[in-house]
Image: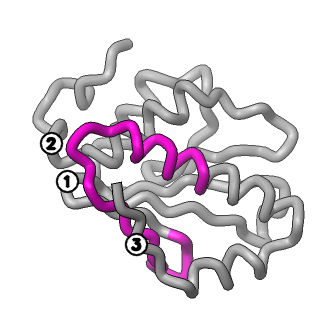
Amino acid sequence: MELISDPKVKDVFSSYPMVAQDHILSLRKLIISTALEIEGLNILEETLKWGEPSYITKFGSTIRIDWKKKKPEQTAIYFKCTSKLVSTFRFIYANIFKFEGNRAIILNFTDTPPLAELKHCITVALTYHKIKHLPFLGMQN
């Protein structure tokens, strides 16, 4: 897999406080390592959308990650709010994740994120346009 990265993304990461940088860079690493495991995913583009680090694939839905001053104790993984992603994640992982509306999974700094489930959500998002027709996006409950 080829990672195409906009150098401006690095500037955004470095603008975060150190504790937020650690969390957000861990999310970045998880997204990239997950993408590497997806068969047929040849290119992952790392860019900025709405000033936030974003990850795009040919057959996926955009994933954004960010830290915000208004909520300094957390990071979030954002998904396209008009997709079925967060509503499906909420149904499958209601007792595992905290959500923000129909657009984000919220990760508090004090919590240990459930990596297998988070990786599963990332995989589903990065392949969304191939699986959006499947019941529950092909996710098992």
Amino acid carrying mark 1 in the image: Phe
- Mark 2, residue position: 130
Which amino acid, by three-letter code, is at mark 3? Ile
Left or right: 46 in relation to 11: left
Cβ atoms at labels 1 and 2 below 8 Å apart: yes
Q: Quadrant of the C terminus?
A: top left
Label located before the other in sequence (2 or 3): 3
Q: Label 1 belongs to which residue?
A: 59
Above/below status of 28 relative to 34: below
Q: Secondary structure at mark 1?
A: loop
Q: Mark 3 — residue?
A: 4
Q: Secondary structure at mark 2?
A: helix
Whether the magenta-drawn stretch holds residue 135 is answered as no
Q: Residue at x 75, y 53 (%)?
A: 23
| Magenta segment boundaries in residue numbering | 28-53
Q: Visible in this render: residue 86?
A: no
Q: Is residue 33 magenta?
A: yes
Mark 2 and mark 3: Cα distance apart in space: 22 Å
> Considering the numbered disc 3 on the image, is that residue within a helix, a strand or a loop?
strand
